Each structure stands twice: as structure tokens, then as C-alpha cells.
Amino acid sequence: MRIHHTAALGLAAMTCCLALSACTNAADWRARTNPEPTGYDVSGIEVQPEIAALLPADALEDGVLDVGAATNYAPAEFLDTSGKPIGYDVDLTQAIAAVLGIKATTHTAEFDSIIAAIGSKYDAGISSFTITSQRTAEVNMTSYINVGSRFNVAQGNPQGVDASSHMNLCGRTVGVQVGTAQEETMNASSKECAQADQPPIDVRPYDDQDAATSALAGGTIDATYSDSTVAGYAAERTDGAVETIGEVEDALPQGVITSKQDTELTTAIQAALQYLMDEGIWEEILTTWGVEDAALTKAELNPRVKD
């Protein structure tokens, strides 16, 4: 659940140190993963004239829907071995463009830089942005997926991690991705442990989820805490080297970001999203990535959420 990213000096070096003992095991689980995913084939999606008509000819300066995404968050948006952006958010971008009869390009960007660049550098942002009242005060957000948080443990849960309550994690080592809501939550839970005279949670931040999963598979940490879609995908891609436990927590909608000044583009994207939902295409895209349970069926503009 991407809320923000924060800079951390020396984090990459720290991550290497934390995962050092897991390097061999990490290579082992990578070797066992399924073939590299290719994503959803959008070539069968036909232009919908009545929806395409919502997009004025001059709405996109270069005729291309330019989308910003922080491509380090599998399975939503990440880079394949050739450096090409893939993931369900990337597939969604291409599907929206197909409905509108235009081309689309996903541009790799720093997560924290995307919103400020909407309406200038990027026409839209599709990068696991959780909808918040703070964000909808600044930009338009159209909901498309519902994502919560979930824990992963090593296969068979050898450490006996009980995630039914965060207080059960006192004294445990939990890996999170830097700048996510999960990092904030684990830090807050760690403080609660200390306040209850329990050992704090050792919260280990990693640059990306692959690094955290590597550490988990190698036995360096007890658990990871991430978006529910990310957790499920990690279990699938590691061929069971890690597995999810507990229930999905604090599910919230995520949204496509557009400029408040660009109402016509916003309307066109919202209509394209709703068409993809109504036709079952959006669920098919998510099924390709094994996370179909997260699909929303209504594309709402700036829905009211509980922050």
C-alpha cells in the first residue's frame, strides 16, 4: 500500500548486510520461480467509440497517454529482465489506451515525484496509489482496485509466527519495503510493544520487496509485511518458498491519478475503467497476475475514504 517513499542514506548497503546470509538461499528461490510473466494481451480489446469521443483530439499533447509509475513493486508495476515495465498496473494502462483508441507509455519514475508531475510530465499516474483525502484534495483519483496488507513467512512457518495480533510480533524481525504504509504500521506496532514492556519489533526496511522476500526465504527475518497483492504474488513466484498467513488487513482502494484541471481526460479514463470492469477484462488482467480478488467493480471518482 503505497503511501509515500522516504529517502534513507546508506539503505542499500544496509540491505545487503541484512540479506548477506541469505544470498545463496535467495538465488535458490529465484531459480525455482515460474517463467517470467508476460502479462495480459490487450490486443483483443476494441476501441469503444462513445468512450473515445470523451477524449478531445487535443487532450494529449503528443497523442500518447504518458503514465508515471515507480516500477519496483511486483506484481503491480516492475521491470522484466529486459528492463520493460510490466505488471497489472501496466496492463491496465495499455487496456485503457486500447479502449480510447490511443497509445500509452509507462515511464519509470520515483514514486514521490509522480503526483507533482501530473498534468505536465505525465498525463496520469498508475502506480498503486492509495486513495486518501489529502491526495484527492490535490489531484483526481479514480478507484480501480482494493488492496490491504498481509504477512508472509517462510514455507511451513518454521518460526511459528502468529500474525493474528501485531502484539504477537513483539520481539520478531519483520521486513518491509521503505516508504510504504506497512513500514509505518510496523514502526507504530513496535512502539506499542515497548509501551507494553514487551521487546519491540525489529523492523527491517528494504529498498524493494524482492530484497525482503530474499531475506525471508533465506531465514534472515521472521516475516514480511506488504500489500496483500504483493504478498500473494511473492508466494506464487517463489514456488512456495514463502507463504501468506493471517487475514488481509486494512483494505483500501487505490486510484488512477489525473489532474483536477484535466476534467475531460479524467472523465474518459473513468469511463474506460468502468468499461473494463463491466466487461470482466479488469478481472481477467488481475487473474493473469493471481490477484483477482482485489478487483473493484465500480470506478469511482474521488471516493470518500477513511484515512
Image (cartoon, grey):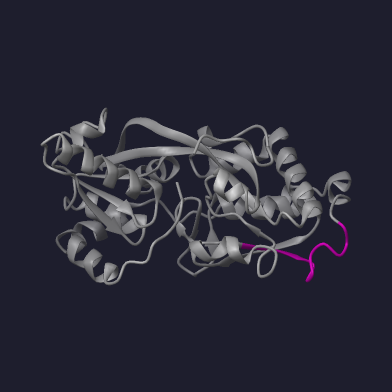
Residue at coordinates 57% horizontally, 51% vertically from top-left?
A: 89
Q: Quadrant of residue 295?
A: top right
Q: Does residue 34 show up?
A: yes
Percent from the top left, x then y, of residue 129? 53, 50
Residue at coordinates 77% horizontally, 57% vertically from top-left?
A: 262
- Above or below, comparing residue 29 to residue 244 in the picture: below
Q: Is residue 111 left or right of residue 164?
A: right
- Above or below, comparing residue 123 to residue 304 in the picture: below
Residue at coordinates 49% horizontally, 61% vertically from top-left?
A: 111
Q: Report the span colored magenta.
A: 56-67
Residue at coordinates 81% horizontally, 55% vertically from top-left?
A: 101
Q: Does residue 40 show up?
A: no
Percent from the top left, x then y, of residue 18? 19, 61
Please tell me whether the stretch drawn in magenta is mainly helix, strand or loop: loop
Of residues 161 and 42, which is closer to you in this image?
Answer: 161
Of residues 56 and 115, which is closer to you in this image?
Answer: 115
Question: For residue 57: magenta?
Answer: yes
- Above or below, comparing residue 121 to residue 292 in the picture: below
